[in-house]
Structure formats: C-alpha cells, structure tokens
Image (spheres, helix red, strand yellow):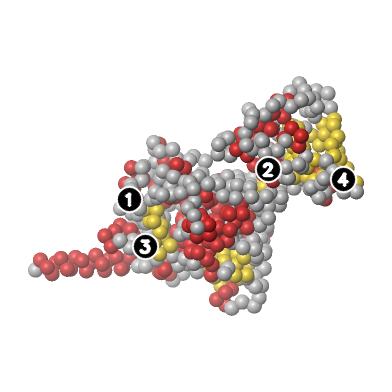
C-alpha cells in the first residue's frame, strides 16, 4: 500500500533522500518506474518504420542516454508524420512506444522493451497531495464534472510502463479491452491507483502530503513541511491543479447550490472541453444557460476538432453552440431555434427545452437573494439589448492553471527566471516552455516533467522522464567517480547546444558515461554505448578482454 508521510519524527534515512519528486500523477509514476531500475531499450524487431531512426538506434539501443536530442534532429525532414507541437524528446519516446501511431491504440507493436537493472536504482520519494496515486485524476473535479465522463485519449495512450490499462482491464473485468476505448474518469483513476503496487514502486509513494516551504540549501534542498532534505528535486505538479477563479462580479454566484428544481438555469461560462463536460454531466432535465466566446475564424472553440464518430458528445455540444451563434445573427433569443441534426447524443435529452446558448454576451449585473440568483446580460447587438435570467449556480470554466507556491519565494524565482507568462502568479502551458526547450533542468538541481513542460498528454510524458532519469543517473555516476559534486551543465546547453533538446544536433559522435547493458549478451557492448555507466564500463572491458584472451589461447 502507498504510504502516508508523517510530519515527524522521521529517521535520518527517511529525511535525507537523493531525489524527491513532487506530485503523484502519471509522469511521476513513469519517472519512479525508471528510477527503480527499469531501463528502456530500443527493440529492433520489427524495425521502426523510420529507417534513419532505426539506424541510429540499432547499435546503441539503450535509451537512457545523454544524446537523446541527436536522435530527433532529422524529424522535421522525415517522411514520418512526427508531431511538431510537442518537445521532440517526447515525440521520440512516443514514436518508439507506438511506431504505428494512433492506428495501433493497444500498442500491439512497439519498439521499446523494458529491462530491470536493480543496480541502477536511484533512491527517491514521490510526494503528492492527492489522497491516492493518480494526481488530479484521483480527486473530485472542482468543476463538478461526472466521474463517468470519458477521457479524450484512448486507453492505449494513457497506459504506463510495466502494467498497461489493457492489463488492468483484463485483471479487473476478466475480459479483453476493445481497441479505441475511451475509458471513464473513474476507470482511469482506478487504474492509476493500482499502478504503483502492480509494478512494485509503491514503497516510495507518500500520498496526501501537503508540501510547502521547499528551499535551496548549500547541498541540495530542504522541505520545511516535512523536514526532508534531498539533493535533487523533480517538479511534476502539472498545470491543471487550479481552475481560474471568476471575476469579482460573479463571485456571489459561487455560493449557489448549482442544482435546483425550480426551473432556474445553471450558468455555464466557457467554450472548451470543461464547459462541455459540465453540460454533459448535468441531469437531463436541468436547464442550462451557456455563455461562450464565438470567434471561429480567429479563436475557434477546441470542441470544433471533435469528430462526430470519435467524440460524439463534444461534437454535439459544439453543434448546440454553433446553432445558438447562427440563430443570434439578426435574431432575438426568443426566435425559434434551428433544427439540430439527429445523433444519439442530441437525442439524449430535449435540448430545445433545456439549453440556451448566448455567444459573446456580457454579464453586467448579478444579485443573489435567499439562495436564488439573477443575472443581467448584455447581448452583442447594435442596440446593446439586455436580458435577465434566473440562475441556480455557476460553472466558470475558462481554463486551468498550475501553481509553484510550494516552493519558497527565492527558489520559485530561480525556477521562473527567464520564463514566459504567468497568470496572476499561476503557471500556464507557456510559462516554462522556452526554458524546457533548452533543458528540463530549469534551475540547478531542479527538473520539470509532465505538463509543466507544456506537453499535457500522458503519451508525451515518457520522453521528459527518460531524459531526466538519464541526467540523474549520469550525475550520480559522475559524483560517485569523482568523490564530489559535478557542476551543472550551463542552462540552455543540453548535449548539443542551446536548442538541442528541441531540434537535435548533427553528427554521430560517441558520448561519454556509458552505463547499462542489455540482457542480450550479443548486444552487451552496443547496449551500453551512449548510456551512463553505473554498473561499470570495466565489466564490459573485462568481458571483451576475456573473449580476446580465449581466442588467443585457442589459436596458440
């Protein structure tokens, strides 16, 4: 069972740890799995469909290597359809895990195999405030979204190493998972809750830990809230932990219950997936007043990308919004709505009766009396027409943000130095993006993984975790061999220069610090090449020398 971390007292072994991971969501789980000694290797059977990537990895299959960026240099010119919005190191691991792309949801074909090398373990702890492993997936959604809402990603794209969602489905449901299944939030939360125990990493998970006051010390970091010291810090708290708060005008509406039987409407503000989730989660007879931005030419709703077959519920909400927007052009809100095309989702309730969409309107006044709310709205017409509606609650769903308030001000300033935009002190997908394009070590000894890098999908968490694990193991080897600390590589210069992590580097020079060997004896030399050496390159040298002497003895 994952542990609950007491405040005090703790033994010296418990309070002095090599690495602390803050956050107990999927990216923390992937990194912990690797730091437990599970090493990813390139599997060449079948060869990856990108012949150049295959050639680069064939004789150096260990993926815990310091030159991951070199492997991605050709991606922009490749005939393969590599994603261009995610960090290439994340795209690299994604294409190796699923070489056939999204057409192979369950990962029947993969170019990654995991080998267990216990001597490579890095002592670490995973501290997260969620009560069980899973991060935000383990807690009630503050927007009151139903646990039955389906995930955007297919199950195969949500799977973690060593125990896939299909494995969990088979174990718990006694059945095979169908391809292209979108699990519910509840099913995913149950999978993530079970994952650490299933792969044997639950010993380092401390859940329900309210972390605060992390400061830099001379030899690492100190976590005041729990009296723990560590050498390295990995931030995996994401960018979705806080819903953007309503403006002061709307705050009185947050005190309303959010459901009623008096015919009052639930006010939903937002044009994205969370707004749609709220609408889908409401009881079928709950009237809804939906205020949303409508600017399809310049800032289209993300719901527009939801295909009718893959995301019928999101496509349905988008149709409701589009119909409302079209009806508002030269028409009054009381005009008869256009008829909706018939789909199972749109047949699920009488939308003409329960849904009222008002694009681009403005809330100009709010009043709350005896648990009942009234809002005055200004329509975007030339006359500035105002209308009044009774509401029973507010779902303000215009976005989410992350927070680094568990770092003390000095350390937080270090992490954010040179970073991008902040939203009232909150972290957005763009805040650390420029920094992580140069190096995932955003301050000396401080690394970020998961959506803090700007890549929010679980499928794109692997690359950053492999990169950070490789850096930690390399640095641990360097400190062990030198007997002291090794200076941090200057920020912005991962192996190949300022933009190498994003763009890769030319050349195929042999990096230093080899460490892991494949279990395949025929590939022992090649498997170790390009990897940090914790097992000892001397073992490989002895193996080579013994083989040479045997041949020499036989010849004589």
Q: What's the residue at 58%, 54% (across, down)?
A: 187
Looking at the rendered structure, the secondary structure element under dot 3 is loop
Q: Which mark is residue 372?
A: 4
Mark 3 / mark 1, whichever is N-terminal: 1
| Percent position of residue 483, x then y | 44, 71
Mark 2 / mark 1, whichever is N-terminal: 1
Q: Could you give the CA–CA distance between mark 4 and mark 3, rounded to whole angstroms? A: 65 Å
Per the image, the residue denoted by label 3 is: 516
Per the image, the residue denoted by label 2 is: 280
Looking at the rendered structure, the secondary structure element under dot 2 is helix
Closest to the camera, between mark 2 and mark 1, is 2
Residue sitting at the far top: 330
Looking at the rendered structure, the secondary structure element under dot 1 is loop
Closest to the camera, between mark 4 and mark 2, is 2
Depth check: give the residue in front, 417 or 452. Answer: 452
Q: Could you give the CA–CA distance between mark 4 and mark 2, rounded to whole angstroms? A: 23 Å
Depth check: give the residue in front, 377 or 64. Answer: 377
């Amino acid at each position: 069972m994952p542990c609950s971390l007491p405040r005090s007292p703790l033994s010296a072994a418990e309070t002095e740890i090599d690495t602390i991971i803050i956050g107990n969501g999927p990216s923390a789980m992937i990194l912990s799995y690797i730091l437990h000694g599970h090493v990813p290797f390139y599997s060449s059977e079948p060869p990856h469909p990108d012949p150049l990537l295959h050639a680069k990895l064939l004789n150096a299959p260990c993926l815990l290597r310091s030159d991951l960026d070199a492997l991605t240099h050709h991606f922009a010119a490749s005939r393969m359809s590599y994603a261009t919005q995610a960090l290439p190191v994340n795209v690299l691991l994604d294409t190796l895990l699923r070489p056939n792309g999204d057409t192979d949801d369950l990962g029947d074909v993969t170019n990654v195999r995991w080998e267990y090398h216990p001597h490579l373990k890095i002592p670490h702890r995973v501290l997260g405030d969620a009560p069980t492993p899973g991060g935000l997936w383990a807690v009630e959604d503050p927007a009151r979204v139903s646990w039955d809402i389906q995930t955007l990603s297919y199950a195969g794209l949500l799977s973690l190493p060593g125990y896939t969602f299909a494995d969990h489905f088979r174990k718990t449901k006694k059945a095979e998972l169908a391809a292209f299944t979108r699990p519910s939030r509840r099913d995913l939360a149950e999978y993530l809750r079970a994952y650490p125990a299933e792969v044997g990493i639950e010993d380092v998970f401390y859940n329900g830990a309210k972390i605060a006051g992390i400061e830099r010390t001379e030899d690492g970091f100190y976590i005041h809230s729990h009296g723990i010291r560590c050498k390295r810090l990995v931030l995996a708290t994401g960018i979705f932990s806080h819903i953007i708060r309503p403006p002061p005008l709307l705050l009185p509406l947050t005190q309303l219950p959010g459901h009623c039987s008096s015919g009052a409407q639930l006010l939903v503000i937002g044009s994205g997936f969370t707004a749609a989730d709220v609408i889908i989660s409401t009881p079928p007879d709950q009237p809804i007043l939906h205020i949303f931005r409508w600017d399809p030419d310049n800032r289209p709703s993300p719901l527009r990308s939801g295909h009718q077959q893959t995301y019928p519920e999101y496509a349905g909400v988008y149709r409701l919004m589009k119909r409302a927007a079209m009806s508002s052009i030269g028409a009054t809100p009381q005009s008869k709505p256009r008829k909706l095309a018939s789909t199972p989702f749109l047949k699920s309730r009488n939308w003409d009766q329960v849904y009222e969409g008002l694009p681009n309107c403005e809330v100009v006044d709010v009043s709350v009396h005896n648990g009942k709310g009234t809002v005055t709205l200004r329509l975007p017409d030339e006359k500035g027409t105002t209308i009044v509606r009774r509401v029973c609650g507010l779902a303000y769903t215009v976005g989410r943000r992350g927070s680094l308030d568990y770092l003390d001000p000095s350390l937080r300033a270090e992490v954010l130095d040179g970073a991008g935009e902040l939203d009232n002190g909150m972290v957005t997908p763009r805040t650390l993006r420029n920094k992580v394009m140069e190096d995932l070590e955003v301050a000396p000894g401080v690394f970020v993984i998961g959506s803090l890098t700007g890549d929010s999908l679980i499928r794109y968490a692997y690359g950053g975790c492999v990169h950070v694990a490789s850096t930690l193991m390399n640095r641990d080897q360097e400190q062990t061999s030198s007997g002291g600390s090794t200076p941090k590589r200057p920020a912005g210069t991962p192996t190949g220069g300022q933009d190498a992590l994003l763009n890769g580097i030319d050349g195929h020079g042999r990096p230093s610090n080899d460490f892991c060997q494949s279990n395949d004896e025929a590939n022992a030399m090649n498997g170790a090449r390009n990897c940090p050496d914790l097992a000892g390159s001397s073992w490989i040298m002895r193996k080579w020398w013994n083989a040479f002497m045997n041949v020499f003895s036989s010849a004589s």
